[in-house]
Image (cartoon, grey):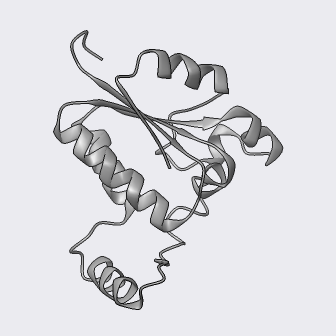
């Protein structure tokens, strides 16, 4: 992070495809605006970031069937990148860090090598609180 670069912190708690898509799109906009993005995953979002889970859940949920079919078709045809692909690309072009909650990792017996390569570290909520103190904006998903 440079001294004048704004910081966006994002807390994600849900492991659903929809919420991770929302996360990746918000992160994309922030990276495009030259923000550093810090993501803290809790609850079942931690489990969604395990190696065996990234890439397996591609089910879009909505109460509007048209949205589900349009979004699913766009992902299938490559018009919209899957959230994990987008986050990988964002890490290449901008400053993006993903932290998995230490408590949830411990409860689910998830170690650093169990996570997909997207996850940079396992750390506690105190680490997220520190990130918040340096953030210009915070989003909770």
Of all residues, the one furthest to the left in this rendering is 33
| Residue 71 left/right relative to 120 | left
The vertical placement of 135 against 64, above or below, is above
Among the 4 quarters of the image, the one containing residue 8: top left
In the rendered image, which quarter contains the N terminus? top left
**Residue at the image point whose x is 21% and y is 74% from the top:** 79
Q: Give the residue at x 47% y 79%.
A: 62
Number of marks present in the image shown: 0
Task: Please give left or right for residue 41 compared with residue 83 in the image.
Answer: right
Establish if 6 lies above or below 84.
Answer: above
Of all residues, the one furthest to the front in this rendering is 63
Q: Is residue 117 left or right of residue 35?
A: right
Q: In the orientation shown, which residue stands out farthest toward the top?
A: 3
Q: Nearer the viewer, residue 113 or 15?
A: 15
Question: How far across and how far down the image is residue 67, in percent?
Answer: 35, 83
The answer to whether residue 69 is above or below residue 123 is below
Measured from the top left, where is residue 52 in percent x and y? Answer: 61, 62
Residues 7 and 115: in front is 7
Q: In the image, is residue 126 above or below residue 37?
A: above
Q: On the image, which quarter does residue 99 sit in?
A: top right
Q: Position of residue 6 (x, y in %)?
A: 27, 22
């Amino acid at each position: 992070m440079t001294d004048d670069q704004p910081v966006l912190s994002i807390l994600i708690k849900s492991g659903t495809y929809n919420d991770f898509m929302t996360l990746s799109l918000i992160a994309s906009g922030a990276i495009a605006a030259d923000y550093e993005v810090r993501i803290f995953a809790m609850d079942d979002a931690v489990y969604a970031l395990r190696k065996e889970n990234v890439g397996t859940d591609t089910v879009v949920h909505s109460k509007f069937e048209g949205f589900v079919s349009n979004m699913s078709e766009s992902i299938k045809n490559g018009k919209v990148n899957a959230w994990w692909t987008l986050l990988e690309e964002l890490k290449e072009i901008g400053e993006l860090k993903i932290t998995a909650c230490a408590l949830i990792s411990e409860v689910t017996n998830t170690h650093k090598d169990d996570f997909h390569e997207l996850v940079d570290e396992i750390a506690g909520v105190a680490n997220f609180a520190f990130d918040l103190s340096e953030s210009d904006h915070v989003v909770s998903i």
